[in-house]
Image (cartoon, rainbow, N blue to C red):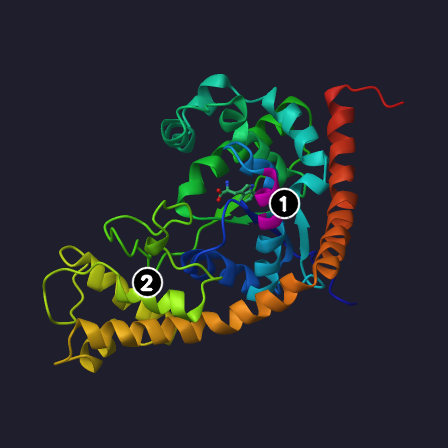
């Protein structure tokens, strides 16, 4: 007898289209998704509805949503292998979010540290969406019965809430949702700001020089690395405690060339910061250029890009509709 085939496990993840993606997001997340898509039934979305929890300019949001989708593909997400879509094109996300909001405790959602951080950062706009943000994220995940959710460490608490909401629904009504696991890659290398190397590189840093974006030109990359903050030492030695700037450049060189830290120290014995920075700049240029050129080609053909997202959205919606129908029925909404 043929062995019965196990259905593949489901993974889902998403990023907000609040800016261009950084080299850190590429190395820390996107590259992993690209590998995972072949082992799992994969869904990747651009979470534009999450983005409006902070103020967005509509034209920019529209543009960046397409930018991020094109960047997913440039990095290697294959829309014939994975379901690639935009969150707002699948209305079931917000529909499920409402049902989950009515199960989520005000107290438990109040404990989310990201809400506390973001409401401090955007004190002039502490809106209710910012508060319920993690419940919408739970809906993104539970709609598709994802088994695994690849995210960064900063999202662990949101995943815990998602699991609690899934279990609560399953308990109150009847088993419905898969309880998802976070899939948090062991961070080998955290990439820090080029200007304040004690803090993480961020796509929303006010100082553009602090961040390498995947859309940066060769000249921009070279100039950012040349201007990167280092300490007053002279040798190329890895000391993440005291010499953040040099350590960060070494990490970037490691990531982009594959050389180990020991090999890098060896390579630059007797050389100074200027030569080292030049080598790091060139390594990053060589690493990013092919991704950027694929991105530019994909982004230039907006009709095809939109058609791809429409197809992904329809596929996602077929799946989402099934889950939502069950949820509505169990909740007690009349089927007419
Ligand atoms: N909150 C996530 C972040 O900022 C983005 C996100 C929204 C997400 N919905 C998701 C990630 C669903 C994974 C699954 O990184």
Find residue 232 and name its label.
Answer: none
- Using the image as rendered, state which of residue 316 and residue 212 is in the foreground: 212
Look at the image and tell me in which quarter the N terminus lies: bottom right
Assess mark 2: CB under 8 A from ligand 1?
A: no
Label 2 crowding class (10 Å Cα cut-off): few <14, some 14-19, many 20+? many
Residue at 54 percent across and 34 percent down: it is 162
Q: Mark 1 points at which residue?
A: 62
Q: Does the CB distance between marks 1 and 2 fall below 8 Å?
A: no
Q: In what element is the residue under mark 1?
A: helix
- Using the image as rendered, state which of residue 85 and residue 329 is in the foreground: 85
Would you identify the image quadrant in which residue 213 lies? Answer: bottom left
Is residue 213 a member of the stretch shown in magenta? no
Label 1 crowding class (10 Å Cα cut-off): few <14, some 14-19, many 20+? few
Kindly tell me whether residue 164 is visible in this rendering: no
Q: Looking at the picture, does residue 21 appear above or below residue 155?
A: below
How far from the left and from the top, in percent, is residue 222?
34, 69
Look at the image and tell me in which quarter the C terminus lies: top right
Q: Principal SS element in the magenta part?
A: helix
Would you identify the image quadrant in which residue 118 lies? Answer: top left
Q: In this view, does 36 lie to the left or right of 316?
A: left
Task: Say whether disc 1 or disc 2 marks the residue closer to the N-terminus.
Answer: 1
Would you identify the image quadrant in which residue 141 lies? Answer: top right
Q: In what element is the residue under mark 2?
A: helix
| Numbered range of the magenta stretch | 58-64
Q: Is residue 326 left or right of residue 25?
A: right
Residue at 47 percent across and 62 percent down: it is 214
Q: Distance between the residues labelled 1 and 2?
A: 28 Å
How far from the left and from the top, in percent, is residue 6?
69, 58
Q: Name the residue under label 2.
A: 224
């Amino acid at each position: 007898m043929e062995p019965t085939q196990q259905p593949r496990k489901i993974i889902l993840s998403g990023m907000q289209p609040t800016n261009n993606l950084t080299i850190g997001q590429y190395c820390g997340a996107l590259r992993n998704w690209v590998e995972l898509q072949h082992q799992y039934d994969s869904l990747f979305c651009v979470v534009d509805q999450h983005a409006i929890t902070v103020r967005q300019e509509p034209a920019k949001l529209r543009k960046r949503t397409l930018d991020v989708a094109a960047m997913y593909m440039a990095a290697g997400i294959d829309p014939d292998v994975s379901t690639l879509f935009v969150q707002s094109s699948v209305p079931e996300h917000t529909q499920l979010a409402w049902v989950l909001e009515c199960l989520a405790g005000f107290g438990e959602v109040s404990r989310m540290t990201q809400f506390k951080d973001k409401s401090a950062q955007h004190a002039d706009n502490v809106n209710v969406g910012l508060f319920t943000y993690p419940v919408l994220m739970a809906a993104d995940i539970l709609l598709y019965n994802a088994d695994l959710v690849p995210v960064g460490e900063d999202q662990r608490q949101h995943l815990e809430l998602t699991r609690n909401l899934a279990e609560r629904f399953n308990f109150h009504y009847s088993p419905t949702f898969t309880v998802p696991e976070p899939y948090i890659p062991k961070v080998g290398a955290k990439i820090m700001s080029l200007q304040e190397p004690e803090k993480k590189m961020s796509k929303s840093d006010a100082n553009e020089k602090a961040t390498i974006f995947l859309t940066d030109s060769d000249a921009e990359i070279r100039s950012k690395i040349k201007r990167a903050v280092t300490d007053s030492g002279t040798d190329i030695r890895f000391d993440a405690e005291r010499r953040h700037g040099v350590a960060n450049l070494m990490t970037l060189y490691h990531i982009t060339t594959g050389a180990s830290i020991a090999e890098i120290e060896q390579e630059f014995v007797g050389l100074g910061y200027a030569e080292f920075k030049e080598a790091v700049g060139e390594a990053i240029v060589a690493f990013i250029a092919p991704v950027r050129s694929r991105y530019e080609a994909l982004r230039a053909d907006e009709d095809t890009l939109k058609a791809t997202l429409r197809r992904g959205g329809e596929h996602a919606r077929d799946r989402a509709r099934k889950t939502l129908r069950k949820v509505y029925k169990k909740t007690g909404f009349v089927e007419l």
